[in-house]
Image (cartoon, grey):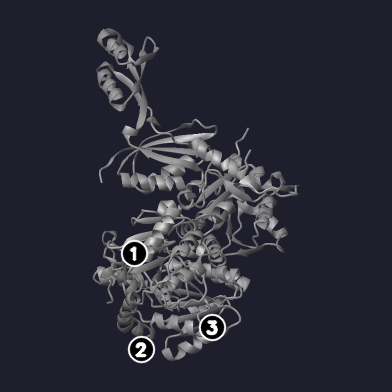
Amino acid sequence: MEKKNYTVSIYTENNLGLLSRIAAIFLKRHINIESITVSKSEVNDVMRFIVIVQVTEDQVRKIVGQIEKQIEVIKAFYHTDEELFFQETALYKVRSSDFMKDSGIQHFIQETNARIVAATPDFFVIEKTGRRQETDHLYEKLKPYGLMQFVRSGTIAVSKNEMQISGILEKFNTTNSLS
Amino acid sequence: MKVKTASFEEIATPESATVSGAEAIIKCLLKEGVDTIYGYPGGAIMPVYDELYKYQDKIHHVLTRHEQGAAHAAQGYARVTGKVGVAVATSGPGATNLITGIADAHIDSTPVVFITGQVGSTLLGSDAFQEIDVVGISTPITKWNYQVTDASEIPEVLAKAFYIARSGRPGPVLIDITKDAQFAPLEFSYKKCSGIRSYKPVPEINLLQVERAAEAINNAKKPMIVFGQGVILGKAEELLKKLVEKTGIPAAWTILGLSALPTGHPLNVGMVGMHGNYAPNMLTNECDVLIAIGMRFDDRVTGNLETYAKQAKVIHFEIDPAEINKNVTADIPVLGNVNQTLNLVMELLQPNDHSEWHQKFKELYAIEYDKLIQHHLTSKNPELTMGEVIDEINTCSDGNAIIVSDVGQHQMVACRYAKFKTSRSNVTSGGLGTMGFALPAAIGAKMGKPDRDVVAIIGDGGFQMNIQELGTIFQTKVPVKIVVLNNSFLGMVRQWQQMFFERRYASTEMINPDFIAIAKGYHIQSRHVAKRSQLKDAVKEMMEAEGSYFLEVSVEQEENVFPMIPTGASVSEIRLE
């Protein structure tokens, strides 16, 4: 079976240790995590993990099964790129002296919807949000100007289809009379 | 405001009193009906032991000689009783010594709550004396784990621990409690946990799948059942028996399914897997419908997956959705507790008779009997075989004993030849294959079922892996019967070296101590036999002994366990020699 990019979305309780519990499931199967992001979700006190892996569909299906088995995981899903809207954010720190000399690059930044978020006599900080190819493209463009630092966030993604987490929690609340 | 993520049973008049964290732990155990726990004291768990001293008339704490012994004893207790076992240890090495037992309980779905002491919360992360990140270490081998640093959390956390350990597919839970949380006061009231919103212990039953399963079973010409521990954990033994009898389908057990159906049941066709019986392994690749019940298609069961039951329609009754299509693709998965799903499918099954198909199992059994079994049980060689020792125990106990086996050749022989009449009579380390399991597990088993005979079958290698637990037997006077089948080899590894490594016996020969002298040192009645003429009398003496008994049997040194499916081979390539 062919390996491709899968985005695993995991809704969990907000508890200590879950990150390592989830990471361990990938480790046990010798699977490298391409990127991982944890944040709050659309539901109060529910966290959302976004994990990107390059695996076969059979592998990702089994991984999601093992993740869902964890007590504090509410629900886990996997999606292909086509089923998602996703973005990454990158920050580029470049030397002011080189950067100021070239109006071409400044123009390029404007054209590609990147932003200058800090400007000092010594350096500029540029922010770019987009797909991996776009942040990579800007990376190549900025490299000649003395890239002092570069960092890129993990992928964040929302699915085109509904995930229905509120429904799952609602159902538990009504059957167990939680207030 | 904190969101409620779990529900707890409401009690009309919950008692409330100010107690220490340590006393709260004991009170929680009592509320969960715990009367026996296994453990070993140490610095970070001393407040709990101080309370155990005060509550010693209510909770029997068994001091093992090593924390690994405590873990396996709690497992043995859980396996025979169906209750949650409890083991306690201190921080650091106490906690790490539990790890093998936790992993064993995890892979064999055994409900055990492990409680470890931890250094004070202000010392966490300072590399304090006996500090270890046991929550981190135990994460991949626990169903759930949690560190308590605030005493007021203790009742809810322990209520959740017991609920998680026993519900759904059972498993081990570890609760790590810092020393300051054991000392700190809290207002104690206890409500049992009844649900956790992110945890669904039993999946919803899809009736359509039940109907599809029934239809496939009704239309099958050559159906075969393979059942595992799920039948025991789901308390579905009677249902399985009824189903087998109604449909006339031959049924084979996995190693952990042993004793869920009486050995002597006419439709019980023995064990599947690497050293299982000839017929069920061969016919796995001939049946038209394979009905898997509460089992997980371990690689030791399936052999080469590429050639496993490819001709068959596979029906998989299973409580854990992650097991569906994990190793073997199920044509008809039936999720749910087998107790409920078997009941539902039963209604739709037509009475049937598969005697012609069953006859095939009998024919293959006859081949196995002629080539192997008769030689194992009635050997003409001067040396005793492992099989005839097990058979003598069968005869003497009339098949009523609980058999606790360790890991290796003797385990396979015990599982092949031991006879069972009632469920939960087989205790062995299946998935993890933990040498050293049997001696402490037998202690727990005997304490869990004091009215049953408990016989531990152990090799000379495994016996020395937790031999210190003879001290626990001596101190508690728990009357377990210990049989060491001594071939002066790590027999299973030696067998593989003989078969696959051209007899290069690297580090498998054992120069053993005088086991009888060791047993004497612990004041355990003991006997050594090497001759066939002495065996019957020795086993009888052991079974009739009032207290614990140690029987060492010198057996043939280079006996091999057959049948055998070599690694990577198909189940139908099972070898008889």
Q: At numbered mark 3, what does the secondary structure look like: helix, strand or loop? A: helix
Query: Observer-nearest residue: A16 or B283?
Result: B283
Mark before the other along the chain sequence, 2 or 3: 2
Lower sequence index among marks 3 and 1: 1
Residues tagged 3 and 1 counted as in contact (Cβ below 8 A): no
Residue drawn at point x = 38 percent, y = 84 percent: B377
Quadrant assignment, res B305: bottom left
Q: Earlier in the sequence, mark 1 or mark 2?
A: 1
The amino acid type of the residue labelled 3 equals: Met
Tell me the CA gap for discs 3 and 1: 45 Å
Q: Residues within 10 Å of mark 1 (few under 14, many from 20)?
A: many
Residue type at mark 1? Answer: Val
Furthest toward the bottom, the residue is B533
Residue B473 position, x and y percent, is: 58, 72
- Residue B110 picture location, percent across and down: 51, 60
Q: CA distance from mark 1 to mark 2?
A: 45 Å
| Circle nearer the viewer, 3 or 1 | 1
Q: Which residue in the protein does label 3 denote?
A: B542
Q: Is residue B117 visible?
A: no
Q: Position of residue B564 (x, y in %)?
A: 31, 71
On screen, residue B192 versus residue B289, left or right, reads right
Q: Which mark is residue B382?
A: 2
- Closer to the camera: disc 1 or disc 2? 1
Residues B172 and B338: in front is: B338
Q: In the image, what residue occupies the spot 26% across and 71% down?
A: B499
Q: Chain of mark 2?
A: B
Among the 4 quarters of the image, the one containing residue B298: bottom left
Q: Is residue B42 visible?
A: yes
Numbered badge on residue B289: 1
Is residue B239 or residue B364 the one in the foreground?
A: B239
* Left or right: B354 as drawn, with respect to B139: left
